Image (spheres, rainbow, N blue to C red):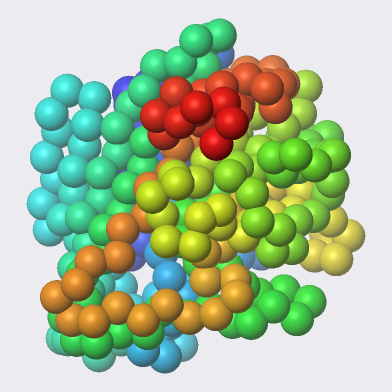
Amino acid sequence: MDALWTPVWASRRPHVHPLRTPLGRVLTVDAPADHPWHHGLWSTIKFVNGENYWEEYGEFGVLVTRDVRVDGDTTTAAIEWFAPDGHAIAMRETRTLRHVELSGGAYAIDWTFSLEPTVDCELDRTPFTTWGGYGGLTLRGAPDWSDTELIVAGAPPTARVLGDRAPWCALVSDAATVAILDHPANVGYPTPWYASTRAATYGDGWANFLNAAFLWNGPERVAAGDTLARRHLVIVADGRVAPSAIEAHRVAWAGLTLEE
């Protein structure tokens, strides 16, 4: 597992980096100069009751890993979300990462994060204007991963995805593929996606951003003691994976039929 993807728990934003293809190509970047709060493959929320858990400047909340347990191919972490004051715990998270071998020389990470607020919470995002809408599971791809394009289930390739709902979205090139799949048990399925390759909108240096933006259309309220869980499958492969193969993996993972 560590040879292909490495979890980093001692971080203000626990994450996975590097994320490698089966042949060893590194597909993620951690803390790039343009957005140093981007951390490889990670999950967090922009605002919890108005306090920032995404960017890391000014006043911001911190995710602190308290316990990590490994059982075979599954790693489970207990994470506390500390408010910017450094004392109050806004939420407790259980994060589960399970390594999954796939056919065709690919593999996947079955990524679940379950959030339990300590007080009634509103989870929110910055509404999209020319940017925004993000939150949840996110990939920031390496800048040298070039000639990428985005494919949303059922649509032609594109350079940007702005709130389109789909069961999956993939960042692909002739060299490698990363696809993030949305589980049908997630609230609001299929999720909206916010993603870009080297879109000129973002200027030099920006590359390869893929987010399962479940808060795109508005905030989600979670009562104290309740749990909000999100589950995704992150497929990683060398070369270009066909949409039909991604769809077959989705059906097998989610226990669906081809018609669902």
- In the rendered image, residue 109, in percent from the top left (x then y), is placed at 40, 33
Please indicate whether residue 122 sits to the left or right of residue 71 in the image. right
* Residue 251 position within the rendered picture, expressed as x and y whole percent measured from the top left: 50, 28
Please name the residue shown 56% across and 53% down the image: 190
Q: Is residue 24 visible?
A: no
Residue placed at 78% from the left, 22% from the top?
174
| Rendered position, 188 above or below 23 | below
User: Where is residue 187, by image quadrant?
Assistant: bottom left
The answer to whether residue 163 of the structure is visible from this angle is yes
Q: Quadrant of the C terminus?
A: top right
Total marks placed = 0
Q: Is residue 53 above or below residue 233?
A: below
Which residue lies most toward the right here?
A: 200
**176 left or right of 66?**
right
In the rendered image, residue 44, in percent from the top left (x then y), is placed at 41, 64
150 vs 58, left or right, is: right
